Amino acid sequence: MEKNKILAILEKELVIALGCTEPVAIALAAATARKHVNGAIQELVVKASGNIIKNAKSVGIPGMSGKGLDFSAAIGAVAGNADNGLEVLAGLTAEDERAAFKLIQEGKVKASQADTPKRLYIEVIVQTESEHARVIISDNHSNISLIEVDGKAVFRGGCENSSVQSGEESLDKLTIDEIFEWVLEVDIQDLTVVKESITLNRVIGEEGLTGNYGLNVGKTIRMNVEKGILSDDLATAAMSLAAAGSDARMAGSTLPVMANTGSGNQGIAVTLPVVGVAEKLQVSEEKMIRAVALSHLVTIHIKSKFGRLSALCGVTTAGMGASAAIVYLLDGSLQQVKAAVQNTIGNVSGMICDGAKAGCAMKVSTNSNVAVQSALLALNNQEIKSTDGFIHDDVEKSIEAFCTLGNEGTRQTDEWILKLMMEK
């Protein structure tokens, strides 16, 4: 693959996002529909796929107390800026929140599950006294595939079936071998977006360590290191910073993050374990940037086959990317990078996704720990063998098997997870 195509993949898949991307995507659809009609809102209807409901039900929205599909749609409709993409909810005020709650209290907001086979699907209809608009987002969080005004299509998206932003042909040709070679050779000046991901995501990591967010997973790990109960080592450095970033994001921090393949939490889990280890090892800034680039690209490579939403936790793929990057930080070989990915696949493949929530920080912590463990085993030339589970001798075949499990093998699991969540 041409070198500039890999850079183009990075620049398409790393996007600044404010707030958890599922409620933000609902807000974006609502804000876009509202933009196309005039007059006071009489009815606001939102329908979403089960996976969207799962991840929008309980997660915090930056600076707001409201949660859920109805609130996400209402706040997007009354205060969202559709032109800002995944930063649609930037600059919200208490007055905006009151206006959103007023719509809900007046019974003007209706939310339900969409009848669709798509895992990522959002449909919003805004009805005023004289007009109505319908907006559909499908397959990725910012992909508006349809805008209708009074029943007439005014916009149809051109990538409705894509699961990630980059072209499928480019992603299909990507391999870990090629990614590793590219990371070693790319001009560091071309990795501006990677450096920005480190800067943005580190800020929210520090916010989680100093503030009071969610379950305070990262802060608790750091506190116990300071007490001498936990060791001050690579694993705790990776776990505390990454989990703290997730603590803050899942609890509604107003800080933006650099998302990876549509997920802000995944963006945190791709970058911050690597940053934590890099700082602990006191490597150069250039080496840290190259390591984070490797983590991003390995995760993008796997997610292109895995899909954006699944019954399995997407942060597991971030752990796979981080494990590769940690091997690089410790001067490992390409074979050891691939062994680390193999080890991570063999370890965390069964972790389910039961929605976006404060507890996601615990899963980020777990995957960060696994990334370090898998890397250290690989550096000692220890690798899960093809005799174990669904692991193959070839890492690319192991990735395919893992992604098949996530896409095809867990459909009934996905349905049951949502059913159990909705019955509470």
Image (cartoon, rainbow, N blue to C red):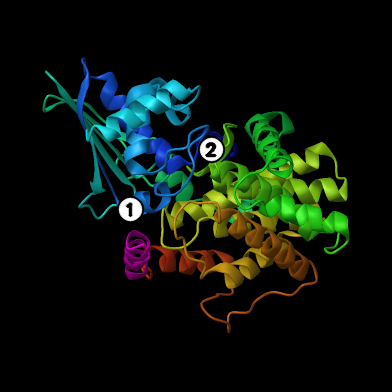
Give the extent of the magenta segment.
411-424
Task: State the residue lying farthest toward the top.
Answer: 38
Q: Is residue 272 magenta?
A: no
Mark linked to residue 119: 1
Q: Position of residue 351 (x, y in %)?
A: 52, 67
**Crowd rating for badge 2 (residues with CA inside 10 Å; few <14, some 14–19, many 20+):** some
Q: Which residue is mark 2?
A: 5
Tell me where residue 386 appears, x and y as whole percent: 58, 80
Q: Secondary structure at mark 2?
A: helix
Q: Residue at x 52, y 32 (%)?
A: 63
Tell me the tag on residue 37.
none
Q: Are marks 1 and 2 in contact (CB under 8 Å)?
A: no
Determine whether, in the image, residue 107 is placed left or right of residue 413. left
Circle 2: residue type: Lys
Q: Position of residue 9 (x, y in %)?
A: 52, 39
Give me the C-alpha separation between circle 1 and circle 2.
28 Å
Look at the image and tell me whether residue 157 can be seen. Answer: no
Q: Is 379 situated above or below 365?
A: below
